[in-house]
Image (cartoon, grey):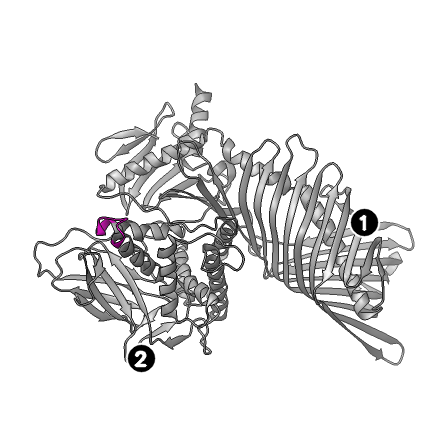
Amino acid sequence: MEGLNRFSKKKIFVACSLSMSAMLLGACGGGGGGGGGGGGSSDDPTTTVTISGDAAKGIVIGGVVNVHPIVSGSIDESTVLGSGVTNDSGRYENLELTNYDGGPIAVVISAANDSSTSMVCDIAAGCGDGVNFGDTFVLNELELNAVLPEVDDTSPDIAVTPLSSVASELALNNFSMGSETDILDAIANANTSVADRFGLAGDVTQFSVVDVTDPDEVASADQFTLQYNLYNAAIVEAVLGDDNTASIADAVQAFANQYVDNGGVADTEMDGAAGITLEDILGFASDVVDSIETVAMDAGVDVSLNTLQTLIETQEMIAADGSTDPTEGDSSDNGDNSDLEIVQDTVGDLRDLVNGVDLTDTEVFIDRLELAEAVAGDDAIYALEALSVAAEAIGRAVEFVELVDEQAVEFADGNINVVISEGVYTVEDMIPVETSSGMTVDVDVELIATDAGSTITEMVSEEVADDGSSVNVVTVEETNADVDFSVTGSATITDRIEVEVESGDIAIVLVATDTDNGLISSEQDGMDVFGDEFISELEATDVALDLNVIISELTADNPVSFDGNLTFVADEIASEETDFFGSGLFGETGSALINEFEESLTAGEVTFGLSGEFTDQAGESLTASLQISADARGVEFNCVETETTSVTTGEFMVMEECFDETADNFVEISFGLGFSLDIDGIDNDVAVIVSGERTDIEAADVTASVSYLENQFVVSYSEPTEEDALRSVMIQNQDGVTITLSETADPETDIAGSISLDGTVFAIIEEQDNGLVLINYTDGTFESL
C-alpha cells in the first residue's frame, strides 16, 4: 500500500501542476485582471458615481474624457454623464457621473480642439516627422472607446485603449446585427473575447495601463500587463506598416473595422493579402520590446525582458503556421456566479483537463516532446555543423574571387573543394565532424550558394620597429565582408539522418583581422620567452540565417521527420585566436620550446528558432514552435593551452586552463515552446505554450500556459537554488483563481495548498494519510482533487 500511496502522491502533484515537473513546462499567456465591470444599478437616479482609469495609445496627455450612456445599443453622444481631462500620466481620476441610473456606458477619449492634447510615441519605428519612440508630440485627432455593462463606485479602473476600442465596436455591432440580444451580455462577451483572441485572460477594459517607453514602469509591471500594452502599441504600428499615410486615429478605427467586418483576426495571411494578422501584431510587439530595452539601457535601468521577448516570438512563430481564416476569441461565461462557484468551476475545468490528458505518467506530453527530440538531437547538430563548415569554405572562396582571381572556377579550402560558376558556389564533399564523445562522423554535404550581392574589401598595413639592434615587422591584414547568399543543399549521415535545405538566405557582416606580430619577448613563469605571435580576430554582426528545411531520421524503428523553418539571428559574435611559437630559458633547468594557443569567444544577443511539423511513420504529428534566446553580453569563454618541451630532457607537458560562466556572471537564457493537443472530452484543441528563464547558473523559472475555449491555466514553477528546498507550483486561470500546491516537510502528507480569488481564500488543500488529496471549501463542502 505504501508503494501505491507514493505513486498516487506523485500522480496528484504531477497532474495538478499539468505535468510541470515531468516535462519542465514553462509559460506564456496569462491574464491581467478578471471579471466584468461593476455592480448593480442604483434605485436613486440622482446618485453620483465616480470612475477612474487610463487612456493609452501610447499615453494620452490632455485627452478629453466624455462618458455617455448606451441607449438601444448605440452610444448616445448627445448625453454626457461626466467629463474630464487626462493628466500627464494619461490618467483620469474620480470622474463624476451625474444622473446615472445604471446600465451600460461608453468612455470616449478624444483630442482637444485647441491642440492641447499630446501623446507619448510608443511605436518602435517612431511616429513620423522626427518623433522617435518615447517622444511626446501634439495629437489633433483621436478617438478611443471603452464600453461597460454598468459601473458603480466600486468598479475597477477602466482602461481605454485600441483593444478596448475593438471590443466596443464588436459589442455594438453584435447587438445591432442581432447576434447578441442583450446589450449587457454583448459588452461583457466582447470585452473578454477580444482579450482571449490575443492570448490574454480577462476583460480588455480591466488591464493596467503602462507607459512602455518608461523603463521604470516597465520594470515594475508583470508580464501579462506588458503583453496587453505591447499589443495596443503594435496594432497601430501594424496598420501604419500597411498604410503609412493613415493617422493614428484612422489606424485604430481601421483595425476595429477589420476585426468586426471579418469576424476577428487571422493568424497569418497569404503573401500580399490585405489586412492585419496576429502574426503582424506579434512581430511589431517584438519590435517594441527591442525599443524598450534600448531606452532602458540608455537610462541605466535594469529591465529583464528576455522571457517576454521569447514568449512573443514563440507566439509569432505559431501564428505564422496558423490559419488564414479570421477568428474571434472565446468569451468568459461566469455570468452571475458567486466567487465560490467560480472557484469550484475552476477545479472542475482543471479536473476535465487532467482526466482528458490522462497524466498518470505524462505520456501524452512526453511522446510529443520525443518527436521533437528525435530530429533535433546530436545527429542534426552534426549535420548542421557540416553545412556550416561548407558555408565557411564558400565564404573564403568568395573572398578569393573578390580579392585575388575574378576568373577562378575552383577554390580549395583545405580538403574542401568549391566549384565556382557565374556567382554560384558549390560544395560536394564528405566533411568530418567531431562528436561530443571525441570521435568523428562523416557527413555527406552538398551546398549550393548563389551570391546575392556580397561585397569584400581588404587592407594590409605594416609597422616596422627598429631599436638599432634588431628589426621587427608587424603585419595587419583586415578584411571587411558584407555577405548575402541564397542557399539550397543537404547534409546526410549515412543510415542516421538527412537535413535538406529546400531554400534559405544567409546574411552576415564580417570583419576579419589577422595580425603577425613577428618576434616578441615576454616573461612567463619567471623565465624570458621569445617567439613568433599570430592573432586572428573575427567579428560577425547582423548575423541572419533563415532556412526552410526537412530533417529526417533514416533508420529508426519509427522514424521522425521535421518540415519547417529554422532561423538563427545574432547581433554580434566575436572570436580571437592567439598562437605563440617560441622558446625560453628556465634558469638552471635549461631551455624549452613553448607553444601557447589561446582562444576566446564572446557574443551579444542570439536567437534560435524552429517552427514546423514533426511527424513519425506511425502517424503521430505535432505542430510546434521552439524559440531560444540568449544574452551573453559580458560573458567571455576563454581557453589557454600551453605545450612545453624540454630541450634538455625531451619531457613534453601540456597544460590547459579554461574560463567561462560563473555564479555571478552567466549567459541569460530564455526559451519558448508552443504546440497544440487534441484531448478527449474537450471540443477544441488545447494550446500549450511553455516558456522559461534561467535565473541562476543552475536554476530556472518555468511556466506553462494551457488554453482552450475560454479557459486558460497558467502554471508557474521555480526550480529551487538549494538542492533540498521544497518545490511549489502555482496555477492561475482566466478568472483570477489561484491554486497553490507545495511539497511539505511532513513525510505523511507530501502536498498542501490553497485556492483563492482576488486575495480571498475559498479552499484549503490537504493530503490525507491514505494519500487522497481533499479540497475543503469555506462553505463546509469538500471534494477530492
Q: Which mark is residue 115?
A: 2
Q: Along the line of sight, which residue is nearer the eye, 672 or 83?
A: 83
Q: Residue furthest top?
A: 1
Pick the front one: 444 or 461:
444
The reply, left or right, for residue 397 in relation to residue 117 is right
- What amino acid does circle 1 point to? Asp
Comparing 441 with 266, the one in front is 266
Quarter occupied by residue 2: top left
Residue located 28% across and 80% down the image: 114
As helix, strand or loop, the secondary structure at mark 1 comes to strand
Answer with left or right where residue 620 lies relative to residue 729.
Answer: right
Residue 324 badge:
none
* Residue where numbered disc 1 is placed: 429
Based on the picture, tell me whether residue 499 belongs to the magenta stretch.
no
Residue 349: percent from left, percent from top = 35, 36
Image position of 153 (left or right of 173): left
Q: Is residue 225 visible?
A: no
* Quarter of the figure with residue 99: bottom left
- Mark 1 vs 2, N-terminal side: 2
User: SS at mark 2?
Assistant: loop
Quadrant (top left/top right/bottom left/bottom right) for the N terminus: top left
Q: Position of residue 112 (x, y in %)?
A: 28, 76
| Part of the protein shown in magenta | 176-185
Rendered-image quadrant of the C terminus = top left
Q: Residues within 10 Å of mark 2 (few under 14, many from 20)?
A: few
- Rendering quarter of residue 766: top left
* Identity, as a three-letter code, of the amino acid under mark 2: Ser
Task: Give the residue displayed 65% in from the left and 45% down from the top.
Answer: 550
Q: Residues within 10 Å of mark 1 (few under 14, many from 20)?
A: some
Cα–Cα span, label 1 and label 2: 69 Å
The residue sitting at 41% across, 59% down in the picture is 231
